[in-house]
Image: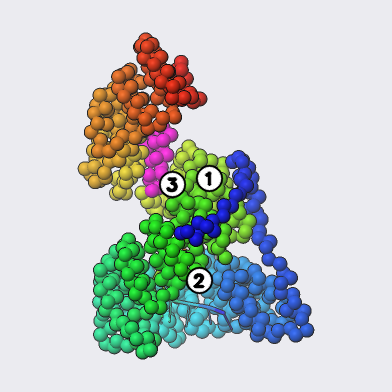
DNA sequence: GTAGGGTTAG
């Protein structure tokens, strides 16, 4: 930690001033592209008298694409005087990997000669894109290609399977003139990922031959369907026959991770302990069935997920062949426990931290509210990716630095990084938090252009609109979600209605939600009780409060009590409201006392108003509101001595009256 | 240069 602090360097950033300026910047930068790369870098290679031959240049292109530098590869491609099919296929690979199918297609159409790999590449690209339009395009090419190999068929089958179209996948599988083991694995995985366990097992048993992937595919597919015990049976059954199969440890590792995901750490450990472990590495033979580094990493991950960092550290200490995964898993474990000292310690000990290590540190510091250190890591990392930007933006958002978040978003686009759902979700939270409807609408436009919203992103949109009072817009998104809604969608709508005075709608939605068996959360009840408070529905409010506890087993929080005090107090039962406060299982906060004070004001209970006001001034010594309210109440009943005393206390404590609170009119 | 299976970050 000391090392980190000593290298800390505060980076001051110029910030745009107003929301309008932010909006303007947002529009202009969204249209800009990344002009960072200079084409001159490669010119020497082609103009040189000893020009490298085609094979070397092809290798260079492949290398660039493997490191994600597709634009650089394209520059090199454009400068090459001689190209062969491999050159073309390589550059197409780059675009296919980035799912830029229009660019890939243009090159495919332009290339002088196509081989089966070129066709396969295009099909693979199309079927990996979201949306049926693309898979049809892939099928179109598949139907028209001059000759097909195993890869063509298997790619098409996988494409259908990934889109849930198992009828077509299975039909193609059955139409194959010859199948290989990949075809079987692909179709079995397809059935498993679409929930058809029975047929998958049948097919597995009918396979003419299996390879290293077959068993793992079955085990991981079963786990995907929650069939952990069935997976264990298959695995242990197969293990008895021969214990030197190289794929066995692969499948064991899958199951260990599966147990970990479901919190079954003990089962995972039992399985881990069943894998033979030879400490003598000279006998190390890949084909032997023994623990490998993934087994260790998976087991460590189980402990990390379960929050048992001690056991994780114990295993980590025993490892002799740690890899980057091991270190990163441990770092993320400490990050999850908010132990940034230990995370930093590991990070510093790592010989070669990769992008995940850096990102974990950023998100850890950002989450803890240490934005300076988070930004310092962000600034110093050798390469950033989308997660790095998102972690930083979400850090600003979570810590209420709205401008920081927006500014980083602008910078991100200027540097050519494309935002995704996570980015937009954070930005919409920023808009909701700062009630910035105009900006929120602009971001909504970007969302429509750039991503297909999922449930959490739609929820962010609803929350943003609802918070800004644009209930109709919020409702439109809610309705578009159809069956995809979750409890957060409902909470956002009910909260929006409740906080903008539409109590009837809020309560109606709550009724529908319950009818649809969506389980409410404590947040739902905060809105429901607020709606009752606004509408003066005393009995209904008390009924909901009771049902929250008895029917849904939700522990009431201080927010619920604040609402209940409001409901009861405003109805004139000020003494009952006071009794509620006295019997609360925790310390009342300012919302609770504020509700009581409001009720006292309406019902002219000066004595309790004094109690509430004094409590409030203790919680918020700098606020003038309780003084002003109390002053006015005393004045109203002619108790001028008390009124004057309030003013004197206020002056003595150097409290300045805030705008919006009038000495003369306290009704606001 | 293309198809299926195991562990890490937002």
Identify the element where label 1 is drawn.
helix
Which region of the structure is painted magenta?
Answer: A488-508
Residue placed under numbered mark 1 in the picture: A402
Chain ID, mark 2: A
For label 2, the crowd category at 10 Å Cα-Cα, with few meaning under 14, some 14 to 19 and many 20 or more, is few
Mark 2, secondary structure of its residue: loop
Q: Is residue A22 left or right of residue A197?
A: right
Which residue does the image show at 70% across and 84% down from the upper left? A52
At x 38%, y 83%, the residue is A212
Q: Residue at 37%, 32% (x, y): give it.
A: A619
Q: Which residue is mark 3?
A: A478
User: Can see residue A56?
Assistant: yes
Name the residue nearer the viewer: A573 or A321: A321
Q: Residues within 10 Å of mark 1 (few under 14, many from 20)?
A: many
Residue at which label 2 appears:
A352
Q: Quadrant of residue A169?
A: bottom left
């Amino acid at each position: 930690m000391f090392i980190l602090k000593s290298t800390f360097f505060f980076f001051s950033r110029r910030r745009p001033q107003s929301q309008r300026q932010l909006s303007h910047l947002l529009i202009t930068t969204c249209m800009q592209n990344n002009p960072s790369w200079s084409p001159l870098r490669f010119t020497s290679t082609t103009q040189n008298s000893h020009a490298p031959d085609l094979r070397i240049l092809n290798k260079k292109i492949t290398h660039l694409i493997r490191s994600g530098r597709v634009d650089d590869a394209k520059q090199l491609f454009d400068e090459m005087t001689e190209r062969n099919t491999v050159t073309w296929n390589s550059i197409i690979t780059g675009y296919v990997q980035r799912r830029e199918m229009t660019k890939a297609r243009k090159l495919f159409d332009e290339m002088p000669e196509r081989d089966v790999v070129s066709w396969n590449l295009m099909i693979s690209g199309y079927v990996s894109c979201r949306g049926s339009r693309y898979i049809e395009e892939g099928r179109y090419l598949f139907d028209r290609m001059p000759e097909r190999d195993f890869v063509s068929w298997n790619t098409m089958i996988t494409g259908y399977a990934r889109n849930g179209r198992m009828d077509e996948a299975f039909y193609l599988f059955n139409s194959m003139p010859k199948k290989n083991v990949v075809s079987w694995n692909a179709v079995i995985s397809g059935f498993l990922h679409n929930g058809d366990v029975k047929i998958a097992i049948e097919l597995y048993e009918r396979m003419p031959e299996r390879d290293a992937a077959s068993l793992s595919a079955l085990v991981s597919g079963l786990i995907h369907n929650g069939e952990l015990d069935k997976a264990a049976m298959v695995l242990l059954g197969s293990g008895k026959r021969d214990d030197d199969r190289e794929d066995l440890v692969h499948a064991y590792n899958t199951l260990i991770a599966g147990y970990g995901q479901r919190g079954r750490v003990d089962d995972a450990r039992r399985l881990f302990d069943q894998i033979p472990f030879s400490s003598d590495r000279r006998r190390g033979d890949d084909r032997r069935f023994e623990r490998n580094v993934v087994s260790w990493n998976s087991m460590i991950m189980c402990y990390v997920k379960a929050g048992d960092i001690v056991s994780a550290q114990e295993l980590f200490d025993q490892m002799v062949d740690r890899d980057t995964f091991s270190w990163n898993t441990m770092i993320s474990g400490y990050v999850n426990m908010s132990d940034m000292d230990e995370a930093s310690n590991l990070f510093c000990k790592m010989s070669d931290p990769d992008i995940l290590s850096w990102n974990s540190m950023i998100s850890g510091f950002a989450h803890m509210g240490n934005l300076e250190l988070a930004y310092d890591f962000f600034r110093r990392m050798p390469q950033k990716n989308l997660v790095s930007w998102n972690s930083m933006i979400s850090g600003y958002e979570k810590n209420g630095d709205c401008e920081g978040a927006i500014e980083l978003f602008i910078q991100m686009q200027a540097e050519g990084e494309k935002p995704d759902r996570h980015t937009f979700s954070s930005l919409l939270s920023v808009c909701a938090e700062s009630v910035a409807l105009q900006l929120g609408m602009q971001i909504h436009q970007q969302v429509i252009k750039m991503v297909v919203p999922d449930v959490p992103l739609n929820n962010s949109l609803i929350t943003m609109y609802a918070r800004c009072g644009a209930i109709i817009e919020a409702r439109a998104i809610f309705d578009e979600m159809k069956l995809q809604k979750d409890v957060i969608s409902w909470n956002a709508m009910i909260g929006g209605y409740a906080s903008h005075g539409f109590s009837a709608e809020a309560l109606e939605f709550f009724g529908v939600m319950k009818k649809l068996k969506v389980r409410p959360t404590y947040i739902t009840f905060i809105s429901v009780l607020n709606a009752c408070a606004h509408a003066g529905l005393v009995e209904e409010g008390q009924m909901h409060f009771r049902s929250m506890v008895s029917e849904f087993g939700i522990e009431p929080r201080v927010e619920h009590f604040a609402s209940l005090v409001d409901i009861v107090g405003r109805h004139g039962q000020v003494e009952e409201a006071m009794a509620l406060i006295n019997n609360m299982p925790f310390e009342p906060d300012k919302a609770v006392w504020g509700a009581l004070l409001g009720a006292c004001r309406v019902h002219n209970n000066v004595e309790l108003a004094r109690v509430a006001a004094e409590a409030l001034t203790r919680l918020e010594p700098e606020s003038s509101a309780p003084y002003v309210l109390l002053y006015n109440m005393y004045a109203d009943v002619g108790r001028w001595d008390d009124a004057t005393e309030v003013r004197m206390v206020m002056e003595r404590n150097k409290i300045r009256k805030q705008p919006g609170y009038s000495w003369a009119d306290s009704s606001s």
